[in-house]
Image: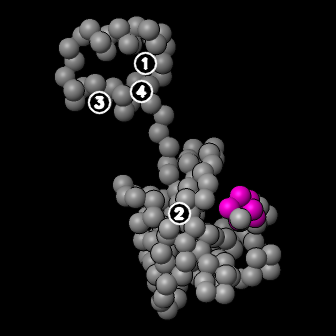
């Protein structure tokens, strides 16, 4: 609600108040926080093994369940977030090493970081979010792999050849 009210005030007046009224720093930070849009930040892994096959997981909550491992960042670095998510959801250890691309998605409002990485080790264990996994050759997708996920992988790989 406050963000909607603040947006009604012309920017030049906000800047004038910011410069000339001695608000305490905590109040300024609160106003900035409340006045700006917030986004979730997700990490999505393009993870390969030694055979250059792609790690895909079968999500328990999707109609088309197969896709790249992913999750929300929880006040952490993107690479750490992806490594944590994969370990929590599968028991597998990966090493994230570079950001391939980013994208904005509107439902829900979020920024996706597409991260490249490699499989390190581990024994798969199912979780509440992931029931199965596999390493697949590029283009040889399991049944139930959404076209959107296929395009994400294709775009990520083509942009980084």
Find numbered disc 3 in the image and state the secondary structure of the residue it sits on: helix
Find numbered disc 2 in the image and state the secondary structure of the residue it sits on: strand
Q: Disc 1 and disc 2: Cα gap in Å? A: 38 Å
Task: State the residue at coordinates (49%, 49%).
Answer: 40
Judged by depth in the image, the label closer to the viewer, 2 or 3, is: 2
Q: Quadrant of residue 161?
A: bottom right
Residue 12 in sight? yes
Indicate yes or no whether the magenta region holds residue 155. yes
Q: Disc 2 and disc 3: Cα gap in Å? A: 31 Å
What residue is pinned by disc 1? 6
Judged by depth in the image, the label closer to the viewer, 2 or 4, is: 2
- On the image, the x and y values in percent for residue 136 come to 71, 82
Residue 161 horizontal side relative to residue 36, left or right:
right
What residue is pinned by disc 4? 35
The circle on residue 22 is none
Find numbered disc 1 in the image and state the secondary structure of the residue it sits on: helix
Q: Earlier in the sequence, mark 2 or mark 4?
A: 4
**Residue closest to the far front:** 161
Q: Earlier in the sequence, mark 3 or mark 1?
A: 1
Q: Earlier in the sequence, mark 4 or mark 1?
A: 1
Q: Disc 4 and disc 3: Cα gap in Å? A: 10 Å
Q: Earlier in the sequence, mark 2 or mark 3?
A: 3
Vertical position of residue 10 compared to residue 126: above or below:
above
The reply to whether dot 4 and dot 3 touch (C-beta < 8 Å) is: no
Residue stretch rendered in magenta on the structure: 154-160
Q: Disc 3 and disc 1: Cα gap in Å? A: 14 Å
Q: Earlier in the sequence, mark 4 or mark 3?
A: 3
What residue is pinned by disc 3? 29
The circle on residue 98 is 2
- On the image, the x and y values in percent for residue 91 come to 46, 84
């Amino acid at each position: 609600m406050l963000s909607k009210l603040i947006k009604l005030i012309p920017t030049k007046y906000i800047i004038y108040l910011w410069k000339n009224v001695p608000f305490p720093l905590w109040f300024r930070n609160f106003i900035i926080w409340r006045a700006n849009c917030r986004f979730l930040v997700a990490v999505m892994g393009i993870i390969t093994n030694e055979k250059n096959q792609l790690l895909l997981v079968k999500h328990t909550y999707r109609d088309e369940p197969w896709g790249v491992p992913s999750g929300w960042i929880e006040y952490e670095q993107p690479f750490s977030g992806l490594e944590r998510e994969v370990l929590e959801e599968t028991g597998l250890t990966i090493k994230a090493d570079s950001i391939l691309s980013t994208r904005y998605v509107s439902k829900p409002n979020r920024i996706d970081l597409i991260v490249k990485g490699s499989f390190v080790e581990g024994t798969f264990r199912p979780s509440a979010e992931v029931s199965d996994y596999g390493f697949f050759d590029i283009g040889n997708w399991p049944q139930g792999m959404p076209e959107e996920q296929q395009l994400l992988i294709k775009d990520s790989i083509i942009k980084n050849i």
